[in-house]
Amino acid sequence: MDTNKVAKEAETIELKSSSKNVFFLIHGYTGSPTDFNGLGDYLHERFNANVKIPRIIGHGTIISDLDKLNYEDFLKDIEKELRKEIDKGNNIIIGGISLGGLLAIDLASKYRIKGILNVSTSYDFKFPVNIIRYIIPLLHLKYIKKPDYNLKKRIKLGAYTYPLTHLRGFKVVSQAKKKIDKIMKKVTAPCLFLHYKNDNVTDYRGDKIILSKLSSKIKKSIVFPSNGEKEHNIFYSAYHQRIYRILGDFVEKNRLFG
């Protein structure tokens, strides 16, 4: 349970309609529901669907609240929120960004999900981040400052995020990867994976590794070309409006809500 006050800007986002259709979106590590920028509003308006973006335990308070939390803690917390929607008999499309993408895959292996929409999934890290992860234990550091060019841009656009990166995230992603490698073949829902080639944290080639292991009959990966930006979260890149349409078109074309 969180022990510190949650910032108002980091609280769960819920956009409600009379529909039984739900987009259930999962934010990233050290992020918040605002990770998706305007996607929630876009999906709500285009499909007249409910949108729920839960705040994950330990987030939106102070960064030290993440010090002892593991992948299974996040999974248990987000699964509890998903169960609320399942118990209502809703049709659910699940999606995630970064670590949230791994959580989405894990949950889709257990429940009847209509589709998966993942962005910047943190399955593999990009150089030099993949090297730094092994050096971190030798430095005895817990946190490092996030790059200003990402942080300032997001805050200006109303996003909530920590100014620091919690280095425990490497351990959490490792735990997640070990888990989903065992259960990916159980995933059968249609899925779309989007990534930015110039992602400065994760490697876009990890998406194809995941897709090759899923049992889904409908699966697609799109990689956006580099345009000079260094951005892990492409919802805050120059491509964001185009990404909304691509995600919406995938849902509509494949009749994910039937």
Image: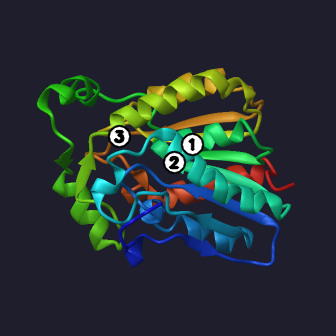
Q: Residue 30 or 237: which is nearer the viewer?
A: 30
Q: CA distance from mark 2 to mark 1?
A: 8 Å
Q: Residue 92 at what x, y percent from top left?
A: 75, 55
Q: Relative to residue 5, is residue 187 depicted above or below?
A: above
- Which numbered disc, 2 or 3, marks the residue that appears first in the sequence? 2
Does residue 171 appear to the left or right of 16 in the view shown? Answer: left
Looking at the rendered structure, the number of numbered marks drawn on it comes to: 3
Residue at point 26%, 31% (across, down): 129
Secondary element under disc 3, as helix, strand or loop, is: helix
Image disc number at residue 169: 3
Q: Relative to residue 256, is residue 207 depicted above or below?
A: above
Residue at point 44%, 50% (across, down): 28
Residue at point 76%, 46% (across, down): 113
Callout 1 environment at 10 Å: few (<14), some (14 to 19), or many (20+)?
A: many
The residue where tag 1 is placed is 103
Image disc number at residue 74: 2
- Amino acid identity at mark 1: Leu
- Which numbered disc, 2 or 1, marks the residue that appears first in the sequence? 2
Secondary element under disc 1, as helix, strand or loop, is: helix
Residue at point 63%, 37% (across, down): 106
Indicate the colouring scheme. Answer: rainbow
Q: Relative to residue 242, is residue 51 depicted above or below?
A: below
- Which numbered disc, 3 or 1, marks the residue that appears first in the sequence? 1
* Quarter placement of the C terminus: bottom right
Secondary element under disc 2, as helix, strand or loop, is: helix
Image disc number at residue 178: none
Q: Nearer the viewer, mark 2 or mark 1?
A: 2
- Amino acid identity at mark 2: Phe
Corner quadrant of residue 46: bottom right
Callout 2 environment at 10 Å: few (<14), some (14 to 19), or many (20+)?
A: some
